[in-house]
Amino acid sequence: MLLKAVVLLSLASAPPAKPAASAGCATTNIETALQRLEAHLKTAVASASKDDSVDNSAMYFAEEAVGQTWTTRDVPNGYMAVGNDSFTAFEAALFKNPEGYHLVLVGTGDSVINTAVYRCDKSGWTLEKNALEVPIEKAIQLYDNAGLIAPKGKPGLTRKDLKDWGGSILAYHLPRKGRVIRITSYVDEPDSAYGKELGTLEYVQSKFQVVPLKTKAK
């Protein structure tokens, strides 16, 4: 009787087990992950709301991205890439976690960067629309930390320029190895501002966290 009580007490005090990944989300093969996401999107796109007030742009971009013929296939490192004839480049990377993984897709065009982040775990596929989102004020601060914003009254890039910019102001570069996404500047006026390192998005505890550069002197 005493032994039974000890066993019950041990079970009651044991920490809860982490949720296991579903069979479809346990893969570490990025080609398999892309194929499974493509199958999921066929159903998701067909049943998507036709209400114009609902933003489905990330899902439609993901549908376009998973259908690419990938020319760079680094399966061991969970990375794929391709550039096509319309001057658009696509990247895909797998970020594994204890419950499954995040599959990140990035499309780089002439003036716009498109992204889609899907989480796969025991609940299946979930589009995380804000996973890589950097609020405009924080994005401007990244520019400022990198020394790209001109001092007040001096010629050069201003905070207003960034707020009024017609396209994307941040570019994301997925890692071929590791868990760190590079962030670079994507404005090209002035030319000297384009392509500069601004910081990183680091994958920590199943989330992407912005890490700015150390502030540069102006």
Image (tube, grey):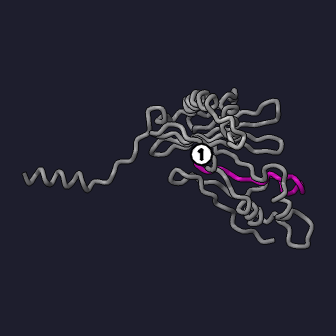
* Spot occupied by residue 152 in the image (x, y as percentages of width and height): 87, 73
Of 105 and 123, nearer the camera is: 123
Q: Residue at x 77, y 66 (%)?
A: 144
Of 170 and 9, nearer the camera is: 9
Q: Residue at x 74, y 56 (%)?
A: 197
- Residue 180 magenta-highlighted: yes
Under circle 1, the secondary element is loop
Which contiguous range is marked in magenta? 177-195
Of 48 and 85, nearer the camera is: 48
* Spot occupied by residue 186 in the image (x, y as percentages of width and height): 80, 51
Task: Report the amino acid beneath label 1.
Answer: Glu
Q: Residue at x 61, y 40 (%)?
A: 93
Above or below, 55 relative to 23? below
Of 126 and 190, nearer the camera is: 126
114 displayed left or right of 193: left
- Residue 127 magenta-highlighted: no
* Spot occupied by residue 143 in the image (x, y as percentages of width and height): 77, 62
| Within-10-Å neighbours for mark 1: few <14, some 14–19, many 20+ | some
Task: Determine the image quadrant of residue 138.
Answer: bottom right
- Farthest-out residue, left: 1
Q: Residue at x 68, y 33 (%)?
A: 65
Q: Identify the residue position indicated by label 1 in the image.
A: 128
* Spot occupied by residue 2 in the image (x, y as percentages of width and height): 8, 54
Total tally of numbered discs in the picture: 1
- Farthest-out residue, front: 51
Image quadrant holding the C terminus, namely bottom right
25 displayed left or right of 17: right
